[in-house]
Image: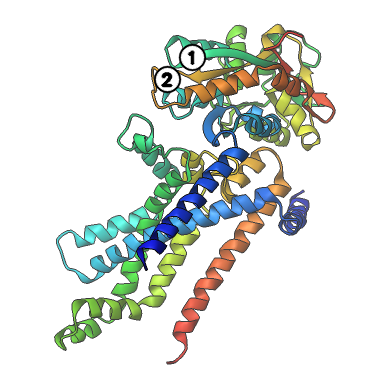
């Protein structure tokens, strides 16, 4: 039974991909654009936060680091519930009409990915030799210049942080289901489609969607590795 | 750029804009609006809405976005104003929804019936029983596995009222409260060779994917009517009441009702229309 679902799912995946099945491409497109947008926003906010935590010395710094690391394990359904209570009608952000829309999914996913970008970004910056930065400062480099140089030095670690955040988001289902509502053609992404097809007993289709999801994640990571690889080449 | 060429440029731009607006109006009589419908997993999993909604969209330029959850949660979304209209199956909860002022205009849409499913070997021996409560009593006595939705859905509410009618408070290791949708529960019952209460539509839609058989059917208490209710704009002024009413009027029109009557899976009719007299 298990093997037949796996093999059946593999064939089904090939058929769905090459016949240009609209539902599959829609779900893949929703997954990609929402998770990429959320990853970009979370990285834009989280990496500078991680940077600041890494280089600044302030009271409660240890606590902030512990907090960020704890939030790495933030359950998706908690984020979904939390955001729901703020965006539903009659609440603070109710008038934005966000619930059951791609916007709500992005908000939830940004909250989910922010600690990942921040915590892993902080680790990447902290692992650098602080002497280089201090030398640059004493030699009179502008703070902006120092930040850019430091970020460049830590680029592999920072890219890895972005990849980890993106990987978490493209595979998550709790936030997408609770805040997006799994609306066909609109907020149904690959993971909620997998949940739906599984609940319908369409295991082969669900498996096919899962294989497509893995291929997408693989493709994104190859892209990131290529970016890293270019950096590794000697100048 | 000279004044004259500026005037010409503005003129051309205006003409193009007017052309676009005019052309757009000519092709589409009304702009596409969207409403949100919270409904049960049974209406979506059976494929019925996929058959109905594109026709409605074509005709009225209203896109219905479907959020498929259990009836209890669908009603909650209506109470919170998260959606514009609900299509559910739990008559007493629906009446309370309207009586409390959350819903306006409830209409009967269609019905099918609930059935008690179980493995073909039927270890509890309930096959052919006409009294659903008596059948549940026998299941409880023989302590065979029973999968309950356990999710406050319409089916769960129905199951609860049947247990209540039998005077039994089901508990114990044989009573499996799954907390999942109808399809997931059918799959679970199939795997565990357990009994389960299901709407006939979902059961038929599953067809050969499961090896469960209809063992108990025909009790009047197993009647399963679906109602559609617009969310009351007095409670939630932002809801798209008029579009919701357009949808309700269409769903209860002869056109949609005929489509419901004609909708089949595996050669069997899943739902029976209630809004239009034959």
Q: Nearer the viewer, residue B42 or B276?
A: B276
- Residue B242: x percent and y percent? 50, 22
> Residue A66 bears which disc, if any?
none
Q: Quadrant of residue B179?
A: top right
Numbered marks: total: 2
Q: Which residue is mark 1?
A: B104
Quadrant including the N terminus of chain B: bottom left
Q: Is residue B190 above or below residue B1?
A: above
Badge 1: chain ID: B
Q: Which residue is mark 2?
A: B233
* Marks 1/2: CA–CA distance: 8 Å
Q: Nearer the viewer, residue A28 or B34?
A: B34
- Residue A69: x percent and y percent? 34, 58
Badge 2: chain ID: B
Q: Residue furthest front?
A: B4
Q: Nearer the viewer, residue B143 or B122?
A: B122
Do the residues marked 1 and 2 share a common chain?
A: yes
> Residue drawn at (72%, 21%), measured in percent from left and top?
B255
**In-image side of B123 versus B22 (left or right):** right
Instruction: Tell me the SS state at disc 1.
Output: strand
Residue A96 in view (yes/no): yes
> Residue drawn at (60%, 39%), measured in percent from left and top?
B26
Q: Residues within 10 Å of mark 2 (few under 14, many from 20)?
A: some
Instruction: Tell me the SS state at disc 2.
Output: loop
- Residue B51: x percent and y percent? 71, 32
**In-image side of B206 versus A211 (left or right):** right
> Residue drawn at (43%, 50%), measured in percent from left and top?
A106
User: Are circles 1 and 2 on residues that touch, CB within 8 Å?
Assistant: yes
> Residue drawn at (77%, 34%), measured in percent from left and top?
B210
Q: Residue furthest bottom?
A: A235
- Residue B157: x percent and y percent? 57, 17
């Amino acid at each position: 039974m298990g093997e037949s679902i796996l093999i059946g799912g593999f064939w089904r995946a090939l058929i769905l991909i090459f016949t240009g099945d609209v539902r599959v491409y829609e779900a893949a497109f929703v997954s990609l654009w929402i998770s990429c947008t959320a990853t970009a926003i979370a990285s834009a906010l989280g990496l500078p936060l991680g940077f600041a935590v890494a280089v600044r010395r302030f009271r409660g710094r240890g606590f902030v680091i512990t907090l960020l690391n704890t939030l790495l394990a933030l359950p998706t359904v908690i984020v979904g519930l939390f955001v729901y209570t703020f965006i539903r009608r009659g609440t603070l952000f109710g008038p934005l009409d966000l619930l059951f829309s791609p916007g709500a999914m992005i908000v939830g996913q940004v909250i989910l990915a922010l600690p990942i970008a921040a915590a892993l970004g902080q680790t990447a910056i902290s692992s650098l030799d602080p002497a280089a930065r201090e030398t640059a400062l004493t030699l009179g480099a502008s703070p902006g210049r120092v930040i850019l140089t430091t970020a460049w030095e830590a680029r592999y670690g920072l890219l890895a942080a972005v990849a980890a955040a993106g990987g978490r988001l493209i595979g998550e289902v709790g936030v997408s289901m609770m805040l997006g509502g799994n609306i066909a053609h609109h907020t149904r992404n690959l993971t909620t489609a997998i949940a739906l097809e599984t609940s319908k007993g369409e295991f082969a289709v669900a498996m096919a969607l899962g294989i497509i999801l893995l291929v997408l994640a693989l493709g994104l990571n190859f892209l990131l590795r290529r970016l890293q690889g270019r950096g590794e080449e000697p100048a | 750029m000279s004044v004259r060429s500026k005037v010409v440029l503005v003129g051309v731009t205006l003409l193009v804009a007017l052309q676009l607006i005019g052309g757009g109006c000519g092709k589409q009589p009304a702009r596409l609006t969207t409403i949100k419908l919270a409904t049960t997993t049974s209406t979506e999993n059976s494929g019925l809405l996929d058959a109905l909604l594109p026709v409605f969209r074509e005709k009225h330029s209203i896109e219905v976005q479907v959020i498929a959850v259990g009836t209890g949660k669908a009603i909650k979304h209506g109470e919170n104003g998260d959606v514009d209209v609900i299509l559910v199956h739990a008559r007493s909860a629906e009446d309370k929804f309207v009586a409390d002022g959350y819903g306006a205009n409830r209409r009967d849409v269609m019905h099918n019936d609930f059935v008690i499913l179980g493995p073909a070997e039927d270890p509890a021996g309930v096959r052919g029983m006409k009294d659903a409560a008596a059948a549940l009593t026998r299941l409880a006595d023989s302590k065979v596995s029973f999968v309950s939705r356990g999710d406050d859905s319409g089916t769960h509410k129905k199951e609860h009222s049947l247990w209540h009618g039998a005077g039994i408070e089901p508990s114990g290791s044989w009573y499996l409260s799954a907390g999942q949708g109808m399809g997931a529960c059918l799959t679970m019952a199939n795997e565990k060779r357990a009994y389960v209460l299901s709407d006939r539509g979902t059961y038929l839609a599953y067809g050969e994917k499961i090896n469960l058989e209809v063992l108990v059917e025909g009790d009047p208490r197993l009647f399963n009517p679906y109602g559609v209710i617009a969310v009351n704009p007095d409670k939630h002024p932002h809801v798209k009441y008029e579009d919701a009413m357009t949808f309700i009027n269409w769903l209860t029109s002869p056109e949609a009702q005929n489509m419901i009557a004609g909708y089949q899976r595996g050669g069997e009719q899943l739902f029976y229309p209630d809004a239009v007299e034959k």
